[in-house]
Amino acid sequence: MKAWIKNLTKQQLLIVTLIAVCFISSIIFVNHNHEFYDRPIGKITNTVQTDKAETVDQHQNQDYMVTQEITAEVQNGSNKGKMIEITNEYFESQAVDQAFDTGDEVFVTIDESTSTGTIEDVKRDKYLILVAWIFIIILLAIGKKQGTLSVISLAVNAGILSLALDIYLQNSDLSLMVICGISIVLFTVISLLLVSGFNEKTYTAIVATLLGTLSSLLIAYFALFVTGEQGLRYEEMSFLSRNPQIVFMAGLLIGSLGAVMDIAITLSSSIFELYHKNNNIKLSIIKKAGLEIGKDIMGTTTNILFFAYVSGSIPMLLLYFKNESAFGFTLSTNLSMELARALAGGIGIVLTIPITIYTSIFFIKRKQAKQ
Amino acid sequence: MSALFVLAIILFVLMAIVGGKKGIKSFIAFIINFFVLITVILIMNDPNGDPVLLTLLACIVISAVSLFFINEVNSKTTLAFLSTIITIVLLLLFIIFITEESMIQGFGEEESDSIYYFSLQIGLDFVKIATAVIIMSTIGAIVDTAISITSPMREIHQQNPTISRMELFLTGIRIGKDILGTSTNTLFFAFFGGYMALLIWFKDLSYSFGEIINSKVFSDEMITIFTAGMGVAIVIPIASGMTAYYLVRRKQKHKA
């Protein structure tokens, strides 16, 4: 440990200290921020299980219903310090309800006359901050500069997305597709510049990403148009407050953007490396080498999208199956949107391979002509 | 004709044109992975099984399909496979802890509209299922990062057989750092795209900042993004270390 500290430069030491201070102070803050909430928060001081009964539902699923008597101390507001009694009932599978332990903090509504309360939600901010910090620290420790840049890229892109949605919601006359298009250009330029700096391979990747995204949009539109969107269950999308088609399309484009950028920058870096090793390299060799790399990465990249999209549906699929819903109905209801997204993303990924190769060749040709 | 079918055909044709034989294999792997996932979900229906253990098995099958079927069994795919499994196990320990503590399992109140006519007393363990979901969302990205490190490392070792174990390890870390940015971006945007509807929902119903960050669905999705990012980062030293260890030791044996 001592040797490790000695090896650090002053600047590194400063950064490590700064991160440590931010980490510790934010953890302390998030564990003592009760006064910042309007909703009353209770900290559970004691739980007693008063009843546990076996239940069987209409589909012969066995479960247990448990009743807990909970004592909690109010942490904020006018009732601060007061002890309240809460009765909590939950099924052991905990699909929407929850078992509580001593030490858990929960948002409650309080009935002052009887000193009883009801649990509304769990205070999850401290876990969120903890996980965010572990993520940041791991990325910085392993990735150093590049790790820092990916944390910044995540923060900036999340900010842009939030801002873009605000603008969309406040100006309902602006179409989501227009806002989405502008955001996509911003996302691409910022992320790729952060990942690989100001140079020709980045510019190539930016052009290729935008062309790749545009062509996958056109193909997805075409596929949906010729089939009349048959088999897509828009009505089953969760959290809908707007026109589902538009929200779906926007999500599709932004969702595949990261993968398309990944392909574009991987290919353009390798191609420009070949060019820098040999400025007079034949374009046919570049084309062949690019295709070889593309073949290697398209399978695994498509898989990233597939698992990131489809895994989220697992709890809902299980709920349907356990309620004896038909197999085909369950799959089409819950997976059609996710599969469409994964397939369209895959199309974008594959299209970006030749697009990046030809964009790189276009730039290299110009350079070779200048020589 | 269903839109999904048409999209699948387009994807197949493009993969075959651009990727040739390997492209067709990639498409078949996509289909196989889909069936593996469905099979796993069907087995999860049995209340006596452990969803976490089952997911671990599924991850082994999925990585094997993605690595050994699309490519072939050789030292780079085997090393990528082993690093993926070690990473998944390490990540699993953390995820089990965090899903247990943060209570993000099951369905949020925002989803109550779509589940109100279902029986929820179904005897499954939704806490373990939440762990399974997070691991499953990340597996594709971890496999991708692992193979992107072991493959050029073997290349470098072949061109430069005298390289020391430490040098080879550091080369692996350098390669890993270069792809860290793009791999995490791939995941971030995949999740952003999936959460568009949720974000619009929060804004439309003017949730307060405190309500958003404490809500089950938002915490769940943020924790998934962060753990996925961690997975992509920790596979870098694991894959570099294992590859350096294995390749350099093997060379010494040859000498003897």
Image: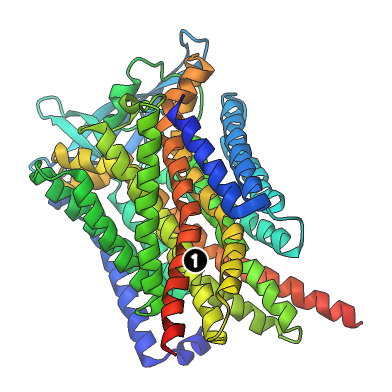
Front residue of B185/A219: it is: A219
- Image point 61% across, 33% down: which residue? B35
Left/right of residue A5 with respect to residue B235 in the rendered view: left
Residue B189 makes an appearance in the image? no
Residue B84 point in image, percent of width and height:
62, 56
- Image point 41% across, 20% down: which residue? B120
Residue lying farthest right?
B256
Residue B226 point in image, percent of width and height:
40, 55
- The vertical placement of A148 against A235, above or below, is below
Quadrant of the rendered image containing residue A27:
bottom left
Front residue of A56/B114: it is: B114
Left/right of residue B103 with respect to residue B11 in the rendered view: left
- Image point 60% across, 80% down: which residue? B170
Residue B219 point in image, percent of width and height:
33, 46
- The residue that label 1 is drawn on is A357
The quadrant of the picture occupied by the C terminus of chain A is bottom left
Residue B252 makes an appearance in the image? yes
Residue lying farthest front?
A369
Front residue of B185/B232: it is: B185
